[in-house]
Amino acid sequence: MTQMDQTRATASVATMQDHETPLLAIRDLTREFKRRGEAFAAVDHVDLTVDAGEFIAIVGRSGNGKSTLLNLITGLLTPTSGSVTLDGRDVASLSDREISALRNTVIGFVPQSHTLLGNLTVLDNVILPAVLGGGGKVPAGGDPSTALGMTDDGTSVASEGDSSATSSGDSSVASDDSSTTSGGGSSVIPSEVEESLAKTGDGSLVIPSEVEESPETQVDPDMPDVIAPMPAAEPNASEADPLVDRATELLTRLGVADLSACYPKELSGGEMRRVSIARALMNDPKLLIADEPTGDLDAESTAIVMRLLRETADRGTAVLMVTHDHDALAYVDRRYRMDRGILTQD
């Protein structure tokens, strides 16, 4: 028996006592949509259980319901019928605040799209989930609610430079960085931001010259994979902060610690993917959900990511991964295939 097999066996024995109540239990789950007046099931009567420490992969062609299933598990979508029970709680019955707390503490989510906040550095993006959970200091960018684009009453506001969206092949939960509206449909801009912006004759906003980017930090849009020059590091006042240590450790494992002071626009797609994985692991979740975690990565980076996910599962975290990468399947315990919304064990 190899050392990896021994580690897996030890983790399996350690979690057997909890198997009477799976960490994730999906029962007869269905989600229907309408296309030109005709209903169809993107997820069709799916049953699945995942225990702590298991590493599960779901494969299948695009457009067959994999991402919709993940969005149902995380509460981004509500089921037409059936149930999702996570950590003993019926996800569909939770309030918006409760499901948000669940996503931040119990779930680590790596979506297909890039969802890093453009106004925060790489390090602050990774630390942010812990800060929002009350686990540490406010990121360097300021108040975490402001960083997330929220007003005092909880209304969403667009953050300049953040064009991220969480999307899937079957459904989309997106944010529009050009105009964000509250209940009445009017644009909401924090007063302190509005006061700092000048308007032209046609009403469009102009960024004051003092906050414009310097030529040294601008990125050539025709070279998206080139890392822009990183500004000189400033003295770190939070060297003793355990959150900084935790985030730095994750970034180091994923080979992107040298980008801690960079902003998302300075990163390549593969670098953003690895930062997103670090952010998903920041709060040590019970369930890690990864939608195409190796989609933008080369073979070397894929191996780094998959070894980390395997070790995460061996330490007791359940890992549920959607992938088209056959090399990634060598690391999983069970494999399922999704075809036209129907899930079967492969």
Image (tube, grey):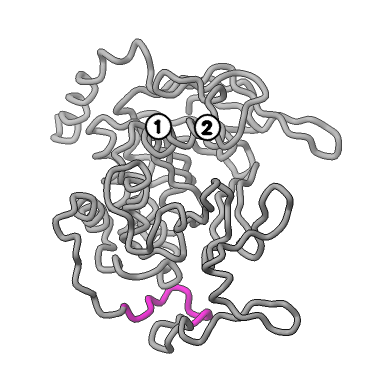
Q: Mark 2 points at which residue?
A: 337
**Given this view, does label 2 or label 1 mark the residue nearer the observer?**
1
Q: Residue at horizontal 41%, vertical 35%?
A: 320
Mark found first going from the N terminus, 2 or 1: 1
Q: Farthest bottom residue?
A: 215
Amino acid residing under circle 2: Arg
Q: Residue at horizontal 39%, vertical 28%?
A: 334
**Horizontal relation, residue 72 to residue 88: left or right:** right
Q: Residue at horizontal 47%, vertical 40%?
A: 322
Locate the N terminus by quadrant. Answer: top left
Q: In which quarter of the image is residue 44?
A: top right
Amino acid residing under circle 1: Ile
**Horizontal relation, residue 99 to residue 107: left or right:** right
In magenta stretch: residue 193? no
The magenta region covers: 220-230
- Percent across and percent down for residue 177 are 60, 63
Frontmost residue, 101 versus 344: 101
In the displayed structure, 41 sits above or below 331; it is: above
CB atoms at circles 2 and 1 under 8 Å apart? no
Mark number for residue 56? 1
- Percent across and percent down for residue 297 are 40, 59
In the displayed structure, 336 sits above or below 35; it is: above
Q: The residue tagged with tag 1: helix, strand or loop?
A: strand
Q: Quadrant of residue 63?
A: top right
Frontmost residue, 146 versus 99: 146
- Percent across and percent down for residue 186 are 71, 57
Q: In which quarter of the image is residue 124?
A: bottom left
